[in-house]
Amino acid sequence: MEKPVATVVKNAGSHYLLSPLPEWDVFEAVLRGKIRLKGSSITNPVAVGDRVVYEDGVITEILPRKNYLIRRSTNLSRQAHIIAANIDRAYIVVSLYFPEVKLPFLDRILVTCELYGIPATIVLSKTDLYRETDPDGVAHLKAIYEGAGYPVLEASVKTGEGINELREACKGRVNLFSGESGVGKSSLIKALDPSLDPKIGKISAAHLQGKHTTSLYEMYPLASGGFVVDSPGIRGFGLVDVEKEEIARYFPEMLKASTHCRFTPCTHTHEPGCAVKAAVDAGTISPERYNSYLGMLEEDKKFR
């Protein structure tokens, strides 16, 4: 007789909430001690979205993940935290201002999505605030990321722009919403399903670092279909398990151009005949994305 399998929908530190997705029938479970010891550099051996085997309210096995999103917190450089597992699509929520979008931060998330095989969409929120005041800023952000191959969805909770499109895209999928504090992520989730109550603007900065973030990750069912994982606002996003020589492979536009580089391998920094640098000069690869890449190379040195 096969043991039952369920999905972790909330990590509350000492215990977990599970549900046999796609059914939503939540129950509590605890983690067997042996599993806790695995992966000592990871602060949470079990993540929201994990499919687990359980028996009598005890998680006995974590099934293999199809993918996961992981970050290294900048203040704990040797420790990594899994944000969520088995994700069908990640929605990275950004705002032009209030807070201002930090492109290197966004690019580190996108590189991690590429590394672990997670399709990503960028959601530009609060478009009602700057559609008229800074249309060039909106167009510039879209040009950078659509040029790199990422969908950019414009959305506004206030006007309803993009909400129906986002709701349709989430149907039948496990969707992760992530981004920096204050970008309007939880408000977007509530707009998708007004019956939900993700914590809007109540998470203090003290809880955004290290091991204590685990209690804030939670999956919700959407009334329109599908599931959404809400993650707390993230301030630091360090890369995990990627070698310096491989980083360029996870910039889709750089990977495409690199096939024409004179030398292989090419770091795209100083080599003659580098097709990536030529593409940056020609404007087909954005200087912002290229500068993010150079920053990751420098950051990589700090962690070694």
Image: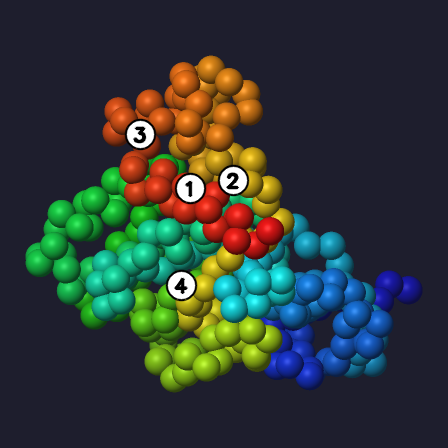
Q: How crowded is mark 3: few (under 14 residues within 10 Å), some or many (20 or more)?
A: some
Q: Look at the numbered discs 3 and 4 and tell me whether their residues touch, using CB distance below 8 Å.
A: no
Residue designated by label 3: 280
User: Image point 57% across, 79% down: which residue?
Assistant: 212
Depth check: give the residue in front, 53 or 239.
Answer: 239
Q: Where is residue 229 in the image (x, y as percent from the top left)?
A: 51, 67
2 or 4: mark nearer the eye: 2
Q: Where is residue 247 in the image (x, y as percent from the top left)?
A: 52, 40
Q: Residue 179 carries which label?
A: 4
Q: Which amino acid does label 2 sit on?
A: Ile
Q: Which mark is residue 293?
A: 1
Q: Which SS class for mark 3?
A: helix
Q: Earlier in the sequence, mark 1 or mark 3?
A: 3
Q: Which amino acid does label 4 sit on?
A: Gly
Q: Which amino acid does label 3 sit on?
A: Val
Q: Residues within 10 Å of mark 2 (few under 14, many from 20)?
A: many
Quote the CA–CA distance across marks 2 and 4: 21 Å
Q: Which SS class for mark 4?
A: strand
Q: Look at the numbered discs 2 and 1 and tell me whether their residues touch, using CB distance below 8 Å.
A: yes
User: Image point 30% across, 36% down: which residue?
Assistant: 286
Q: Is residue 118 left or right of residue 164?
A: right
Q: Earlier in the sequence, mark 3 or mark 4?
A: 4
1 or 4: mark nearer the eye: 1
Residue designated by label 2: 247
Quote the CA–CA distance across marks 2 and 1: 8 Å
Q: Is residue 65 left or right of residue 170?
A: right
Quote the CA–CA distance across marks 3 and 2: 17 Å
Depth check: give the residue in front, 78 or 301.
Answer: 301
